[in-house]
Image (cartoon, rainbow, N blue to C red):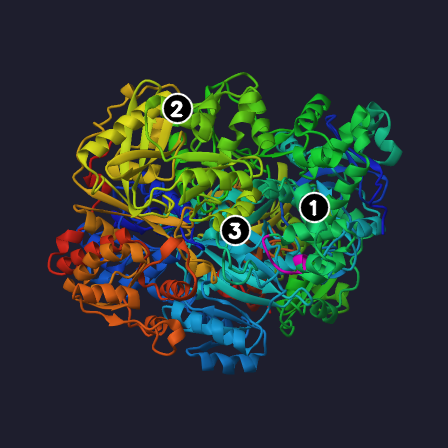
Amino acid sequence: MPRRNDIKKILIIGSGPIVIGQACEFDYSGAQACKVLAQDGYEVVLVNSNPATIMTDPPMATRTYIEPITKASLTRIIAKERPDVLLPTLGGQTALNAAVELAEGGILDEYGVEMLGCKLDVIQRGEDRKLFAECMSEIGLECARSGYAYSVDDAVKLAEGLGYPVVLRPSYTLGGAGGGFAENEAQLRETVAQGLDLSPAGEVLVEESIAGWKEYEMEVMRDHKGNGIIICSIENFDAMGVHTGDSITVAPAQTLSDIEYQRMRVASLAILEKIGVETGGSNVQFAINPADGRMVVIEMNPRVSRSSALASKATGFPIAKFAAKLAVGYTLDEIENDITKTTPAAFEPAIDYCVVKIPRFTFEKFEGTDAVLTTRMKSVGEVMAIGRSFKEALNKACRSLETGHVGLGADTAFERSCADLSEQDFAKGVALPTEMRLYYMAEALRRGWTVAEVHEASQVDPWFLGQMAEIVAFEQHLQAEAADLDDDSLAEPLLRQAKQLGLSDPQIANLCAKAETEVRALRKRLGVLPVFKMVDTCAAEFASNTAYYYKCYDAETDVAPSARQKVMILGAGPNRIGQGIEFDYCCVQAALTLREAGFETIMVNCNPETVSTDYDTSDRLYFEPLTFEDVMDICDLENADGKLAGVIVTLGGQTPLKLADALKEAGVPILGTQPDAIDLAEDRERFAALLDRLGVAYPAAGVASSTEQAVTVAKQLGYPLRVRPSYVLGGRGMVIAYNDDFLTKHLRTAARVTPDHPVYLDSFLEDAIECDVDALCDGKEVYIGGILEHIEEAGIHSGDSACATPPFTLSAAIQEAIRKTTRQLAINLDVRGLLNVQYAVKDAKLFVIEANPRASRTVPFTSKATGVPLARIAARVMAGASLADFALPADDRALEHFAVKEAVMPFGRFPGAQIFLGPEMKSTGEVMGVAQSFPAAYAKAQLAIDTQLPTSGTAFISVADDEKRAMVALAAELVTLGFDIVATAGTLQVLKAFDIPARLARKVSEGEGNIVDAIHDGEIQLIVNIPAGGSSRGDSYRISAAAVRYSICYATTLNGANAIAGAIALLQRAASAPELLAPVALQDLPQMTV
Amino acid sequence: MPNTHNPQPALLLLEDGSAFFGRSRGADKVSFGEICFNTALEGYLEIISDASYAGEIIVLTYPQIGNYGVNLADLQRAQVSCAGLVAHEICAQPSNWRSQMSLPEFLLKQGVVAIDGLDTRALVKHIREAGTMKAGIFCGDKAQANRSELLAEVRASQDLSARNWVAATCQNAPLQGYDAAEVAQDFAAFLKTPKPTHYQVTVIDCGVKSGILRNLLYAGCAVNVVPWDTPAAAILSGSATDGIKPDGVFISNGPGDPEQVDATVETVRALIGQVPLFGICLGHQMLARACGAKTERLKFGHHAANHPVMNLLTGKVEITSQNHNFGIVFDSLGTALAPLAQAPQAPLVQNPDFGRIQLTHRNLNDGTPEGIRLLDQPAFSVQYHPEASPGPTDAHYLFSAFTRLMEGRPDYLDIDIAADRLAEWR
């Protein structure tokens, strides 16, 4: 049966902001679904609070709502749009949970909305471990032995029955939040108490530990006729005990014999049937006892997932796209294989390469947290690499991560750091699952540990270790025979073997004491050149024309460059804090618009979660690491006939920017703003000279290349100072220093971060208003895309600060000054494309803090808030168009609405980490709220993140001395709004003086009934805690930790608190005037199309 | 341990002169055969030990082969019959709890020629475009010998179709004793205890896979194996099987060109209508030929574990294991009739000898016939491999269908895959 014609309008729910455990893979799946359903003639109503996504680009859906994904908000949208069906399986756990709420709350019935893909009871059976285990036992499959705890005491009893260690899994939480291992009762009590709070159902599963077993995942698709296929099997490199999201994983499964694999295959299909998944993609996880093959089912997700994005990229089979088609009635045999175009989608992909995924972590941002990997996911991104062997793919994945490793081993910095470790600490490095263990294991093999010994320590399967041992043995061989490289006849086979094992030129250079450029030149001279193979779903059994490629060192290439004019776009690599989906959004916009403009578009990226690595986003996709070597190899191929118009390096964050100089030097044309202009803006001295010449004010600043020098500079400038290493994104290593002690201590860390670059010290403007500007320039004209006024004061990283456009307090004169200065800077920096400028406004005076002639994190937000697709225009300008070619609306026009962006913080994932905002970015994602007024837009943004905005209750206030006066008005406002106030002694004293009723909050040291207890007991609904000097010790820390744990509305700045008070007032009014929060579709706002 | 550190050089040379250099990973010998490729991701041991590959050099497209070693219980035939193995990389350090030895060790022990270290994807693309052809693998010094002389040797080697491979294989790689209790024990970690035996099934061995025998056993069949050329009378009377008369006869898979295997065709022709019949692969071709069908050579055959086959009676898709270079021409079975009302998608013909024959299964990749049943006689067969071994087990229900046919049920093929899925798995 082909498509259902009884459906016209489909509601799709996205996954909301990027958080740990739910990242941009759902932008990929949602975007695919929107596209394919629109092509099929359906009207798509999309709800997603995340503005940084491709899916929320207005052309992707009929109606696009960047609104909170809450029951109330979705109900308003359903009432307004009246969709026929809801497709809940493409927006991760967020969408599934929202759909469950809507169904259970009777909303879907009330409005006659049918749930597609899977019904409520299916979601419940899949998600509820108890129901799930019952289903498994009915079909004769085993789960780990377990029981449910609803209290800590329950859990203790269960654990005694099962025997320690046990695994704890709170029900219905994302990415395993709140879960973990317990080796003993004390650990169990702590984790269960947390888990019970985090679980919406207040239950925690206590399970026998199968740590050390092999872990597998099967990606399954099913149609309504009951046809089921396995898209991909995935084997975890890390044994059970590390969350799959934090594990290195390999596709396809490597160490299963056919009968073992087939057993898992039929079990997967039977599980989908038993749980009742009607249509779509699901995944099923298994554990296998390596000693006797005993198989247990871990879990299944009746929706597309992070691993289905990986499986799609690993096989070329577009799971989400087909899941959407299956949901509206097609069957697998009716859908054409997207890649071959000649065979049906009802088949199981055959692959002739190996895929390795490695997660990317950012523990360095969360000092104090435990970096050991557990069943609770902590990674913020991932890379995928494709090779003709596990060895090749592993090496490529290592260098894709951008964590300073040029591959597995031959990595002098890491080897040096190991040399200083004691035997015992080194052995711990091999045994403990951490981000670094892979490198420790390789180093152990280098030191002569046997595969069996490393296996014993790490429980990683000996097959993987044997493969690593081959790499290490070859590295040692190459190092010993380095002199052979001087003899061409010996060098050729040696280099070829190195390349087939996946060694990078820098690795070879390290091993042979040569420069990377020498290795490359030698390789080219000897003809040791890569070839590119196609990802074709069928291992070459059928001809295929889809241009999805990877590099290897086999004999024959599958790629013939076309004779068209080409533009290459370098992607942003793995997601990390400070460089995430926003940059993928920009790269995708460029690919789409340049294709429309007639260019052949070539994408290079290594992040499997993204839309940019969808093979139909660009004309050609190279799934490759973003290193000089890998990018240059592609340039050599594609530019063989000189038809490469150029490479775009300014849309993917720092990753491609870092390559700009080397590419240009190698003769590759760089499109848009040239590397020298980027350097002009980055180099503080050059930039300061420019600002002086233009007569633009900036905070007094100095440069220091040593700690002593920094202290001298600090004396001249005076504290507080903003301390900033050069060439960083996301404020890595940035702090506000208030004294010499802090400065000198910090510089030891910062110096380690970027040894080659000096440290900049700027005089920090306290209590200034900060704003961001995104602008376009074609070399002659400048267009101001938007002025974003930050809500928090200067000093908080712009990525962590909420902001609004149009500005809500800046005067017309200041706004005009901002536009004028931005125009001057753009022209004088010779920007061709995007420019982001950060300003501080203090005492009605404008200061330039920094300028970045590249896409900024705010480009998607600004574009959606103003209806002008900045990234698309920028890409066209880079490729030669003028701003005059576009019918741009006046950049000083008045907007009829406000848009607010709010950051989403991952503190809940990093117990023990500091919870204060500062100049180093810590947020993982963002949401947007759109409304007629600033407070309404702000309220929507707050509702869109998990924080509850209270409309009544008790507010706790504690502010530093210099904020006390300013706090009084806020407290008075909260009292007017009906809040009770509790305050710390100093704050209380001031409130008393102003006759504002308040009670004293007891300090933690004062024992029972203290403020943390009050938070724990649900007595506090709003916290305003503004410490002095940005430190969080003692009570402040405990209060913030409790606030994070209980998702209590929490302000750390006075401006933030005032905005919250405004939003609360609005919510109170909205109770009787719901139109204040009416959903706004982007299509109803002015939109410019390019 | 074989010498895996300093393997001998090896050369794969195709009839059209294409040459691929690599390393010898098995017996350092010379071997000739027809080249084919299989795209299954795992199951290398089942593939190379499948007697249907006799006379063929197998290219495995998954680039790392041998990862989980060798467990002898997985062999489809105790003696390997294929002419050689070609892989991108063969692993000498396997890891799996069931592994008894590494793949190179096994290959050496069995005297199988193998080559790795070459661009198998380039090779597969070439076969896909140029079609299947003769090839030779030359190991050791011979790999460096005069190319045109080697090429002459390849070209002079025997054509696959020029020989009755069934006869040769049954002689060279005879079926070893088949002990039901031993099989049950070997697979105890995965499969339930077999059903008690209800049926006596005589298996005509044209190179039968142990996976088929195992599936028959688990479906409740006592298996009595007879050679490929056993006359029908000896089968029906039970004289070929120690006096045991069959409730049904199974016609097995086997190697080579079906047009070379006339004795089996004769036997099957005489069995139709006398006893329930089920054929797989070559057995399917034998049944079709017994009904007068023509067979044809495919360009590069079907060798995979992922081919979609539609059951035309139910409209459902099965993912199947495939291994055949030849197929039947359905139209040659008789004159076209209108399809049955309850199976409008299933073409029907009138056969001059045996009545109506229905096409029950079709390959969705290229539309080739994959299964037939005789509507007026108790007989059916499929071109693909419901026993999997290796590959997906979606079509396992066909073994149950065979027992239902022996029960005399007219609805014997009407089985829900989903309900059958976990039937024998532990």
Query: Share a chain, discs 2 and 1?
Result: yes
Q: Amino acid at mark 1?
A: Arg
Query: Rounded to the nearest whole Å, what is the CA distance between mark 3 and mark 1?
Result: 20 Å
Q: Is residue A1012 left or right of residue B216?
A: left
Q: Are marks 3 and 1 on the same chain?
A: yes
Task: Give the residue number, with chain letter if any, for mark 1.
Answer: A416
Q: Are marks 3 and 1 in contact (CB under 8 Å)?
A: no
Q: Amino acid at mark 3?
A: Glu
Secondary structure under the numbered disc 2 in the rendered image = helix
Tell me the distance, in whole angstroms, between the alpha carbons under discs 2 and 3: 34 Å
Magenta region: A429-435
Please say whether residue A432 is one of the residues in the magenta stretch.
yes
Residue that carries the numbered disc 2 in the rendered image: A690
From the top left corner, tell me how far across and down residue A309 is, in percent.
47, 48
In percent of width and height, residue A893 lies at 18, 31
Name the front one of labels 2 and 1: 2
